[in-house]
Structures are given as C-alpha cells and as structure tokens.
Image (cartoon, coloured by chain):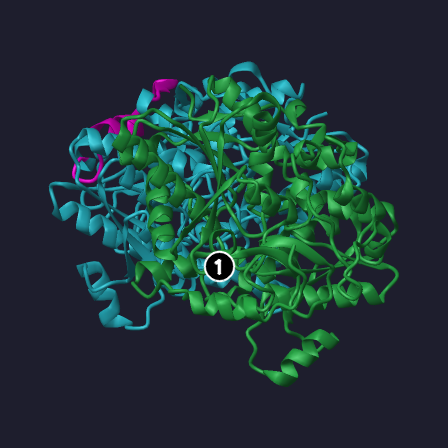
Chain colours: A green, B cyan
C-alpha cells in the first residue's frame, strides 16, 4: 500500500465546482449598508474584474478554468495525498487517515489556488495594481508571486502584529516583488482614523481589509483581492476536493468524515464541496467538519446575521455567522483563523445543518501538530494543526467504538515560517485564552446591521 | 509539455550506485595519522555500524537498499523533476533547463536520503544514541527525524554562529526530539580546549565534528554520523541521479551538463554518479560541474593531499582536495558549503579530470536565487543558489553560441529557514569576501600530513 497517491498533470481539474447550484437554500444577497437593499454586480466593479463578479453570483454548477491558469497550477498541482500510517500507528486507531497536502505550493499553502486565477482575471481587464490584506502572511505571499507572474504591482497591508513578529513572511513577499505595509498605516483614511484613536493599535484583518479596499476604490487601474470568505474564492479552491476524490478512488476508499481548518472558509470549502455535492445529488452521508479556534469561534458561538466584512464598514453587508466586525480575537498563533465572520455559502450550509463545526483551544492544536511532525515528518502550519486536532479526536472515537472509519484531512500548509510559535509552545509560554460569553455578547451588541 | 515529471513509488531505486566499481583509478586508502599506515575497516567500528563500514570500502557496483528504508523514502520520493520554463524565458536561452527538486523532503533538502539509512543501520546494531555535527542545520534536522523514527537519541553539535543566528533550524530539530548544543561546547575535551584558547570562538564544522566524534568514541551504545564527504554518504544520495535519468527519459532528453552545489560532495555525487557511470561504461560525454563558493574553493584553489576531516585531528587522514583542516572560511550564508575538504571519491574524480568545478562569489548566487524565485516560484536555499548561478552561466553561454543544450540542475533544498540571508542581500548588507592566495597558502602551510 502506497503512502502517497499522486495524479498526473492531466488530472488537474478543468472546472471549478460551484456548490451554489446544488444548495437547497441559496445564499441571501449582499446588501447595500446605506439602503438595506440587495446590491447588484455593478456595485462590485470598482473592486473586482467582471469575470470574478460573475463567478461571485453564478448559479452554474461548473465553471471552466482558463487554460493559462491550469498551466500555472501545474507548477505544483495535482498536490499529493498521503495515507498517515505513522499517525495512525501512534494513535493505535482502526481509522484510515488520509491527508491532502497543499504545502507543496510555492507559498506553502492552498492560497495560490485562488491567487493565480484572481491575478489572471485582473490582468485580462488591464489592471496594473492589486491591493490586499494579509494576517499570517500566507495569502499575501501567494498573491505576491501571482502578481509577479503577470507584471501586476502588488500592495499588501499586513496586520501589524504579524508585520512585527513575522519578518520572514514579509521578506518572502518582497522577494516576489510586492510592497508590504504595516496595518494600520498612514497611507489610508481608515488607517489614519484608527491610529488617531489608538497609536499603538496592533491591527486586525478587518482593519487591513478596510485599508486595501480604500486604496483600490480610489484608483481606476487598481483592484482589490481577498484570500477567503467570498464565493469566487471558495469556488477556486474546489480543485482540492476534486483531486482528493480521484485520489481516494485510487486507494479504493470513500471518506466518512472530511476535516479542514476554518478561517473564512475557503480551505474548508475547497476540500469538502465536491463531496458535499455527492451528498446533495446522490444521497451521500459524508460528514464535513470545520475546525475553528476556540478563541475565534464564529461557527460554534457566533450568530447568523448580516455583518460587514471589514472593521471600517466599507464592504457590502454579508449574511454570515459572525462574532461582530469589531470582535478582536486573542493573539493566537494561527493568524489565518482570526477573522470575525464566515463565508456566505458556508454560513448558509451550516445554518441548514449540512456541515458541522468544532472549536479547539490552541494548546490542543500544537500538541496535535507536534505529534504529526514526529510521526509524519511534515511540520504543519498553526492553522493546519486545528484540522489535525479534530482528526485525532475522530480517530480516538473510532478506536473507542472499534469502528473502522475513513478520515480525510486538509493539511493546508507547512509551518516553516511559524517556528516562533512552536518555540512558544515547546518552552511552555503558550497559553489558552478563555473567551467569555459576555465578551461575545458585547461584540454582537454593537452590531446595528439588519438581522438575516 | 509538462512542467513536472513525476515517477510512481515503484520507481524508487532498489540499489545505490557505487561509482567506485567503475573508477579507472580507485580512491587511495584512509591512513592512521599516528602510523601513516592504511587503516582497516575495524578501526572505524567505534564510530559506525559494520554495514556502513562495508559500504565505505565496497567495490561492488550496486548495493541493495533495505526494504524498510525504501518504504520510508516513499514519504517523499521519488522527488519531482521540473522543466524551468520560467527561468528559460527570463534568460531568453535556447537551453533546456531541468531541475531535480529535493526540497520536498521532510527536512527540505536531500539530506534525508542518507539520514534514513544511516539511522536504520545503526538501529540494526542496537545503537541507542547518535552524535553528529551540523552547520546550517540541514543535516542535523534530517538526522533528528530519522533517529526519532527508530527511537534513537540524537545529539547535534551545531556550529555556534548558526546556533545563534538560526534559532528556527534548532527548533525544528527539537520538535523532532533531538538535543542540540552550541559548538564549541564544554561537553567535550575538544570543545573545552578550543574555548580555553578562544572563549568567543564562533565554531566551525571541523570543530563540531571533533566534538561529535569524541562523544561517540567514548560510549559503547553511541555512534557518530556524518552528512557528507564519506563514501557511504555519497553512495546513499545516488538515488537522486537514478530517478533523474528515468525522468529525463520520459522527457525524451539526455543532459549535456549536470550541475550541483558542492560542500562535501554528497549532493553533487548523488545527482551525477549514475550519469558518470554512463560516461565510463558507454563513452558518454556528459559534463559534471561542481559549484562551490569562492570563499571556500577547495576544488578550484585547494590542493590534493591527505588531510584530517575535523579540526582537532581525531579522524583518519583522507586523500582529498583541501584548503587545510584549520582553514576558516568567510561567514557566507551558505553554511552547508563551508567545509575545508572534498569527499575522497569526488576528489579522485576531479584529479582524473572526469568532473569539473567552478567557484562563485555569494552575491552572484543570491542574484541567481532571486531570479529563480521570481520565475519558478521556489525560494532556493543559499547552498542551492550556487548551482543556479552555474546553470545561468551555462544557459547564457548557450544563448551566446546559439547552441541548444540540456542542463540538469540539483535544486537540493528550499530556503524557508534562510530568509535572514535574503534580507541581508535585499537590503544591500551582503558582501563578497575576497580570499587571497596568501591566506590559502598560510592554511596549507600548517599541514604536516603526508602528501598523496
């Protein structure tokens, strides 16, 4: 039995899977915050190329991937799938654990799957500059190289805590030609307003989004790009699940449960949606479990309602599970999971009980990450350790019940730029942060957006 | 035309290629420094398991790889080969450039190819502890995980400059369960003697080897492991070249020139020896070029003679191209290439003009590395940039002459833990160090070892 299951380049998917076509309840529309009315595609034109806006609102089941995008995907795709023999043995579980490994991409995560097409569609519209935000730096580095490939200038607003603590991610973006600014910055009104109130503000993804959106909206030749949350971003990631289906077929298996870390939802959506379509079309019963951090638990402790995607309130209102757009999560190391809301499509699926969610404290995640590194050799990103923690719980339950079970896990990235967080854990400095219900209630009480 | 050429796990080689069987002039024997007489295999028994000692002196053409080692190789092997379309386009060269990418291994380099069998053979002999040295940390991290897999304690002596400047490599070794000590340390007589003379000594590979050898020699249940230079280490790496031959066959090509960075020789040997055998057996004409740093130019400016492998003079005398075992190279960032001598087999091949060598200043290498990252997406390790620099010179020569040429390059590792050195380059702080002939002469004049 092989450890690795590889596919030839000819198996790189030709279409993205649009789960919206199969959803029993379609996502609610985004609203104009000023009028409370649904917004049309044209309202997004200052920020995104029209082809991506069409994808954002499409109900077509399958959307063709441009040839040039598939060609660039072939730099690292199809990504390998591994059977986790080492981890299974350490857990003494009857479960079969498989992981799809996205750390082989140039940026070391799944983010290039959407960075490449986003940059490509912008290039087709003649865009010269793309602005974006980044937390841990995964998304920013993925977009930097994508822009470099197409001769587009990339301007990254990096959350200040990460900017200060992760100089190497910043350097990687610089190496690929991007300009990186600490956010909040003095380059935008949004940033200046926040700095005026709090000069020491450590930043957040919501603030960085406000800054990137502001710059893009001001310039005709500039657009904005987001690394998760939006429908078209989730869509682009579905190549992971399509490849995974073929790879499990080669192994003669079908998953009982699929697990992925959850920040804005693209990683989770990318692996699960092609299987979820099987559930919807063919009565499949695969469980899809989103793993979120206990200190940013929008799926397990948030509410489903309209909220802004950013802190300054510059985006349309989106119907999502949210902790409130002013929610400031504890400074956990999984920076990519510190976002207040969940993508619209994933939120609707959770509301309709078609998917599940679970929250983990970060110490449990780092313990899981170290066990994984020792048994499988790959050092996972702090974000990825959340999925591993869930997989370990599922594998232990299988051992308890004596049940054989097939677990598919999204190992969405390596932790080569995150060793400072492992140091913190290994030296006993890493702490779990209790999140009180009062804190969540206080954040949600600030929301004056319409209920959904 | 595919960018990537992949092989199935069934194509992981079954035997290592022992070039010694085909060499017209066999390597000279190692000598006992006290007597000047050739040493027998038994003299190495306190340090190495007998199976590795047999490999060290074997003249068999092919040596079988144990099944369990092949099984562990399958965690990351066969490694991919890429056609460098992006780099070719940027250079506007008629040359076809292929690179074998070893950065997909758990440690991010080719080093696990020998770490796994070395740990495995030690396990078969009941060894409980393995000591080693590491410079940049590539070898130490490769061996740490290999020992972890077999329940062996790993003790790493890390050159002090790297220990202080590369905390993340150390953490990676800790994550895989190894103990890491800054060298020179107070744990050994060799370390204490050096610290007594120079408390601020920044360390060297030669000193760290002395420390690791001293500890291993003192304990019956402990052995020593080396990451390059020795015949059996070079032997284990030949799986790279065997895979590369098959991959180029799939592409319908055969190389005109093969290029690899050169530290102790294992990386270079691993890719070139299977092709070099073709040269020797079938009259092939492929050029094999070793890329070394201008500040540690043992192949291009050293002498061929007997020298110690370590600084304290604890190892047997080896017939090698050397700058003298007390040579202290400038503190360049490619820590893995800062070793005073070249492996015995490679030295003999160079003496017999069966291979070539070239030296590059480090600025040229970083420029090459940045171009590679921008065009191919992969950020190369500083060691790997040396091979890229040579490949660029070859590709430019092909453009000049209008000649089509097939170049095969060993991209031996990624630079995810080396971004501090890229920062130094990008901010203009990185300098080239001129190495005067007087400095080389002075180092060589200290040698009182027999000429070879």
Q: Is residue B59 magenta?
A: yes
Q: Is residue A16 above or below residue A215?
A: above
Please give the name of the residue rendered at 35% of the width and 20% of the height, measured from the top-left corner.
Answer: B63
Q: Nearer the viewer, residue A32 or A380?
A: A32
**In the orientation shown, which residue stands out farthest toward the top?**
B282
Chain ID at mark 1: A
Q: Where does the image place residue A442, in percent across and percent down from the top left?
A: 51, 71
Q: Is residue A445 magenta?
A: no
Location of mark 1 (residue): A296
Crowding at dot 1, Cα within 10 Å, few <14 / some 14-19 / many 20+, comes out as: many
Q: Is residue B276 left or right of residue B5?
A: left
What residue range appears in magenta? Answer: B45-65
Q: Say if residue B230 shows up in the picture.
A: no
Q: Is residue B5 above or below residue B90?
A: above
Q: Where does the image place residue B184, in percent across and percent down from the top left?
A: 28, 62
Q: Nearer the viewer, residue B376 or A299?
A: A299
Q: Quadrant of the C terminus of chain A?
A: bottom right
- Would you identify the image quadrant in which residue A74 lies? top right
Please give the name of the residue rendered at 49% of the width and 67% of the height, measured from the top-left corner.
Answer: A441
Q: Where does the image place residue B272, in percent across and percent down from the top left?
A: 52, 30
Q: Nearer the viewer, residue B305 or A34?
A: A34
Q: Is residue A307 left or right of residue A39?
A: left
Please give the name of the residue rendered at 51% of the width and 15% of the height, measured from the top-left corner.
Answer: B281
């Amino acid at each position: 039995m092989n450890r690795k299951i590889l596919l030839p380049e000819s198996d790189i998917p030709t279409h993205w899977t649009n789960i919206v076509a199969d959803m029993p309840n379609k996502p609610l529309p985004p609203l104009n915050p000023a009028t409370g009315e649904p917004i049309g595609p044209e309202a997004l034109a200052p920020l995104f190329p029209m082809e991506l806006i069409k994808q954002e609102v499409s109900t077509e089941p399958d959307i063709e991937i441009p040839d040039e995008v598939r060609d660039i995907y072939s730099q690292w795709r199809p990504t390998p799938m591994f059977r986790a023999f080492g981890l299974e043995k350490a857990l003494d579980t009857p479960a079969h654990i498989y992981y799809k490994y996205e750390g082989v991409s140039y940026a070391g995560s799944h983010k290039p799957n959407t960075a490449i097409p986003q940059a490509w569609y912008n290039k087709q519209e003649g865009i010269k500059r793309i602005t974006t935000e980044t937390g841990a730096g995964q998304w920013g580095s993925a977009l930097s190289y994508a822009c470099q490939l197409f001769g587009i200038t990339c301007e990254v607003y990096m959350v200040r805590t990460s900017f200060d603590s992760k100089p190497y991610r910043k350097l990687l973006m610089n190496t690929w030609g991007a300009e990186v600014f600490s956010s909040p910055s003095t380059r935008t009104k949004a940033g200046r307003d926040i700095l005026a109130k709090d000069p020491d503000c450590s930043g957040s993804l919501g603030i960085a989004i406000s800054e990137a959106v502001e710059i893009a909206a001001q310039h005709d030749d500039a657009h904005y790009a987001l690394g998760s949350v939006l429908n078209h971003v989730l869509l682009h990631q579905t190549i992971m699940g399509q490849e995974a289906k073929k790879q499990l077929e080669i192994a003669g298996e079908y998953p009982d449960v699929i697990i992925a870390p959850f920040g804005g939802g693209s990683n989770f959506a990318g692996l699960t949606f092609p299987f979820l379509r099987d559930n919807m079309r063919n009565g499949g019963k695969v469980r899809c479990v989103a793993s979120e951090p206990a200190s940013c638990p929008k799926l397990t402790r948030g509410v489903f309602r309209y909220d802004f995607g950013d802190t300054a309130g510059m985006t349309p209102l989106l119907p999502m599970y949210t902790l409130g757009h002013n929610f400031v999560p504890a400074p956990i190391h999984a920076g990519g999971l510190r976002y207040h809301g969940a993508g619209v499509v994933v939120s609707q699926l959770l509301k309709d009980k078609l998917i599940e969610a679970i929250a983990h404290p970060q110490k449990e995640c780092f313990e899981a990450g170290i066990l994984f590194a020792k048994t499988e050799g790959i050092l996972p990103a702090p974000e990825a350790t959340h999925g591993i923690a869930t997989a370990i719980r599922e594998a232990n339950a299988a051992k308890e019940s004596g049940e054989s079970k097939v677990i598919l896990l999204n190992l969405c990235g390596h932790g080569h730029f995150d060793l400072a967080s492992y140091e913190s854990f290994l030296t006993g400095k890493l702490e779990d942060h209790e999140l009180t219900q009062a804190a969540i209630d206080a954040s949600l009480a600030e929301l004056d957006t319409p209920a959904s």
